[in-house]
Image (cartoon, rainbow, N blue to C red):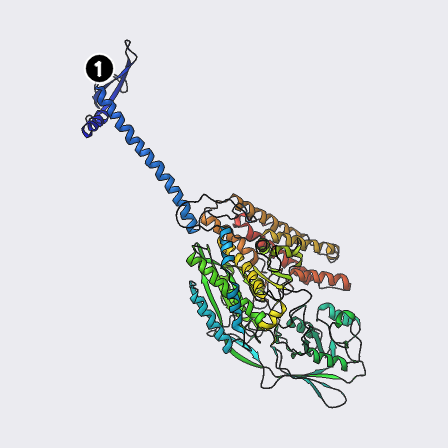
Amino acid sequence: LSHQSHDCLSTQFGGEPTSYTRFSIARQMDGDNSHVEMKLAADDEEGGEVGRPEHLHASMPPPRRSGKNLCFLVMAAVLLLLIGFLIGYLSYRGRMQKVTRCLDGSGNCEMTPTASYLSDDGTEEEEVPGPRVLYWPELRDMLSNKLSTALLEANLRQREGRKSFEAGKIEDESTASYIHDQFTGFRLDEVWNDEHYIRLQDKGSSNNQVSVEEDGPEELLESPDAFVAYSKSGTVAGKPIYVNYGLKEDFQKIKNMGVSMNGTIMIFRAGMITLAEKVANAREEGAVGVLMYLDYKNTDFLVPFAHAHLGTGDPYTPGFPSFNHTQFPPVESSGLPRIPVQTISRQTADKLFSKMDGVKCLQEWTSGAMGCKVTVSSVSKMTVKLTVNNIMVDRKILNIFGVIKGFEEPDRYVVLGAQRDSWGPGAAKAGVGTAILLELARVISDMVKNDDYKPRRSIIFASWSAGEYGAVGATEWLEGYSTTLHAKAFTYINLDAAVLGSSHLKISASPLLYTLLETTLRKVKDPTEASGNLNDRLGSDWVKRVVPLDLDNAAFPFLAYSGIPVVSFGFYDKDDEYSFLGTTQDTVMNLRKKTDKLYALMRAAAEVAGQIALRLTHDHELFLDFDRYTEELLSFQEKLLPFDQDVKALGLTLKWLFFARGDFQRAADALRRDISNSDRENRIIRRALNDRMMKVEYDFLSPYLSPKDAPFRHIFFGKGSHTLQSILENLEQLRDSNNSMDVNKLKEQLALATWTIKGAANALVGDIWNTDNEI
């Protein structure tokens, strides 16, 4: 056969190297068959034109038919083998490429919303043999199955039997060491500490005092163990005046009564806004001192700890990170109270009211206080004396971090964080969040190490210190790494105070995360109901009930200072607040009395936070709904419209602000089209589109302000005259007061807001040549 094959190939392709073969096909008249005649001719053949066949040629003898047939059979067999091999190779290669893309995160290989991330459904790809591929529904179920109620309980009970976890002291440091060891034991990819050296206030050598003076000797009413951090030290005296929650509208009602507030010591009840905001409002009205009491049930003798800094972070290094090796100018935060502040028990507040003989409180101001009065009469000689002995201390604090690195984009990450310190046992304030943080670190690491989950992006777990002093640990970290964090961290999930009750769900979040949060809540069972999910609690108009973040929430500086999308949520009872936050009675036992489903609720909170983190690190396209900001801007425009004529009367106009809103909407539509038309398998394109979505939050930080002087620059959620809310308040004041207004100030407010929104629209469009520079 080898010899015959050789003859076959020789016959087909043989000949002199310098020769070519000419074919002449002639039809024989005496039969149906044709035969092929060949002539071998030299390249320098003489005679005839090139390309024209010779009219005279020798006839070849009849071929040996049996050899020829064999030759074609051999050739056909070889050809078929080659075709079969190629088909098999290409099919195998295609399957392996698909599996490889699943492994390295570059392909559409899971049930994720690739056509639109707003969908929670997809089409599962054909299963192929090879390494395991985790689809989103499977990943979601795996998280739920691995979460352990028993371990959450064990983590929370770490705080039992301890009186305090004050920042920088021994209990706080030992807890930090425990969390570090836990992260290491969970085999996180990296575990590290972040040290900061900060200035805090501590209680002095003697307790602070509240007393009253009348005609007789001074009467001491209370000398509590609790204190208010960052209060001014010293002694002040003044007539008492009660201003309810200390809201702006409360002060307006006092003014309407014709009561003078200058030089007084103001009394507030806790709630509605932070103590720091109450103190700032009081100082603005001329108060020389402030007292605050708890107005909840079972708190007659409780005195809470608190802080009075209207801001976050170390107030003695505003805008700078408190690293030990850095020299800072001697500056202080403008948010320091600069007047003495102290918390008191409700029993002491009742004593004060009993000695006041002035106007009775408004009906809605009375609550649980006995004999509530607004102030003293004009003939009364009663004054309140407040002595504060707080001292300043320098202290080292530790933030503890662990990370699970992404397999495709490790430099893009979600951060889950919880406060670790507390003035008392802090079961609800810090214990619940820390327990959830540890459990999520354990479960997600186990999914990566043992169940083949390969997150595209990184997940950072953070344990903060000095949260009781105004999110100091979290803010100092943001200040220390501000140049990189806003470009790399694209979501912060806050776990603090996740369970304060069971009946209702409180949500604070960036609009970018509304859709993801709603989608997630639909997939988490409600532990207080036999059937149903957590989304059933919200209702269709839940966005209207989103609670603005307050200064004491660690998520606030992430959003308002760094421009990173955030979500903070928790269970509570709307008409029955948890009474013991910030007190020595914030214990596991009291928290369990508040809700008998404590650990089931902790597990549900962990599942919500875990699903959000996993979804953001699993999908190709970031689950950030930038269209929600289009709705927010439209809502703001609708609130402005009634003031259009008032603004025109000042010689100004709102139309440029409205045009900027339209530019943002068109930019959002353009990005949505770019996403729809893009090649989702192209990592470079996908990363560029995700980066445009990531920057939306950051682009709402006003670029016209200094982070040192106005750290919370977000025009939606920040603090200051640059915010959209401030514009609305000034316009309302213009209409209500009917007096002259600083037109130039309003003009500047409108201009800065307009160009911040226009800048956000330009950034959303992408490349500079795609922007519209006409407004």
Which image quadrant for residue 192?
A: bottom left
Answer whether residue 656 is visible to the viewer in this image. no
Which image quadrant for residue 21?
A: top left
Q: Nearer the viewer, residue 586 or 41?
A: 586
Dot 1, how many residues are within 10 Å of its Cα: few (below 14), some (14-19), or many (20+)?
A: few
| 98 lies above or below 40 | below
Residue 518 placement (x, y as % from top left)? 60, 54
Residue position marked by numbered label 1 in the rendering? 57
Residue 17 placement (x, y as % from top left)? 20, 28
The number of discs equals 1
Q: Nearer the viewer, residue 452 or 24?
A: 452
Residue 455 placement (x, y as % from top left)? 46, 55
The N terminus sits in image quarter:
top left
| 580 lies above or below 696 | below
Q: Is residue 389 left or right of residue 679?
A: right
Q: Is residue 701 left or right of residue 196?
A: right
Q: Nearer the viewer, residue 440 or 246?
A: 440
In the current view of this chain or complex, which residue is farthest to the front?
530
Q: Is residue 465 left or right of residue 341?
A: left
Q: Nearer the viewer, residue 303 or 115?
A: 303
In the current view of this chain or complex, which residue is farthest to the top?
30
Answer whether residue 614 is visible to the viewer in this image. yes
Say which amino acid is labelled 1: His
| 534 lies above or below 374 | above
Secondary element at tag 1:
loop
In the current view of this chain or complex, which residue is farthest to the bottom?
217
Residue 216 placement (x, y as % from top left)? 75, 90
